[in-house]
Image (cartoon, rainbow, N blue to C red):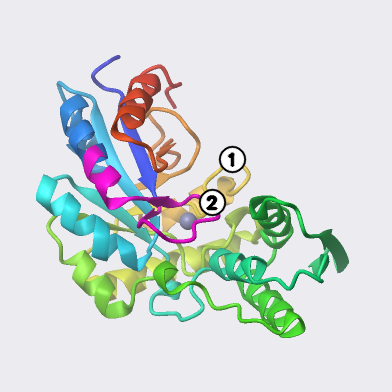
Amino acid sequence: MKSGDARVLFYHRIAEGVDDPFTLCVSPERFAAHLDEIGRCGEPSTLTELSLPSSRPRIVVTFDDGYADNLINAVPIAEAKGVPITIFVTSGVLGSSDGFWWDRLGTLLRSRPSSIKEVSLPADGGTVRVRLGSPWRRIDLQSVRRHLLPLPVGEIHRVLDSVSEQWGISAAPPPDARPLTCSEFVELAASDVVTIGDHTVDHARLRDLEPADQLQTIAPSKERLEQLSGRSISHFAYPFGGKDAFDDHSVEAVRSAGFETACTTIPGNASSTSDPYRLPRHQVKNWSRLRFRLALERWRLAPRH
Ligand SMILES: [Zn+2]
């Protein structure tokens, strides 16, 4: 491996013993083991340090979305291990009792009355009926999620409100899946190991928006996070982050809003020659120490972007 190659990792939540239909959670114990392995195999770094020379491969730990458990569970571990972490926060969801729409969807499908076998969702000016009742809730979740993803975030919440009413059940996200409150965000930003990044106002899939609307969910979010934290925000992560989640207009909006880097979820290694606005990242799951160590080994062979 060339010493210039870096691996940017991304997590979402540090929690255990909770319902986790999207497999976003890593247990605190395993996260601590991951950070030990990162220190053993590489140089724990920030995104700003990516372009600086290093004798050991740089490894950057990032988190997406802005869940409260990042402050409660991840920060104490990162502080104890002295590993820097970057947390991409969805500014408009701070303190929201609705939280993230996918967690509300998880609640609805978990509590769905068994007599209900399908759900009507808006699609292309009409409606589409999605069959439910797969033996694996994940399959129902994925099929409903796929139809909701292209909709504006406000409309997704309205659809979930209406399903909640029709089925007569709550669509509140689980308490453990709540986003940070504003005061928790301020506390998070004050930690010496934390760099705050931006993840838009509402976690919209950018490529579904007109260029001007893309800028409208990117630039004001940076301003709000800077106001709240008193820090300048230089890093961005595209919501959903895959190739189909953003386009050239998104990249231009991020650049013109004044960010220095932007992270995707496209797997690969970064180097000093990577496009700073299309940084690849590797997703980390709830892996044992050994499995994480093997993943770090395997990623040495990942393509460089
Ligand atoms: Zn996200």
Query: Looking at the image, do the residues carrying marks 1 and 2 touch, with CB atoms under 8 Å apart?
Result: no
Disc 1 versus disc 2: distance between alpha carbons? 9 Å
Q: Secondary structure at mark 1?
A: loop
Residue identifier under label 1: 243
Identity of the residue drawn at 30% across and 23% down = 5
Residue identifier under label 2: 240
Closest to the observer, 289 or 214: 289
Span colored in magenta: 12-33
**On-image quarter of the C terminus:** top left
Residue 230 in view (yes/no): no
Identity of the residue drawn at 59% across and 64% down = 106
Closest to the observer, 43 or 229: 43
**Disc 1 residue crowd, few under 14, some 14–19, many 20+, Cα 10 Å:** few
Where 273 sits versus 36, above or below? above
Identity of the residue drawn at 66% across and 66% down = 109
Q: Amino acid at mark 1?
A: Lys
Q: Is residue 12 left or right of residue 51?
A: right
Q: Amino acid at mark 2?
A: Phe
Ligand 1 lies under 8 Å from the Cβ of mark 2: yes
Q: Position of residue 192 (x, y in %)?
A: 12, 57
Where 120 sits versus 195, above or below? below
Closest to the observer, 20 or 250: 20
Q: Is residue 238 magenta?
A: no
Q: Is residue 99 left or right of residue 16?
A: right
Q: Is residue 123 left or right of residue 302?
A: right
Q: For residue 208, what is the image quadrant?
A: bottom right
**On-image quarter of the N terminus:** top left
Q: Secondary structure at mark 2?
A: loop
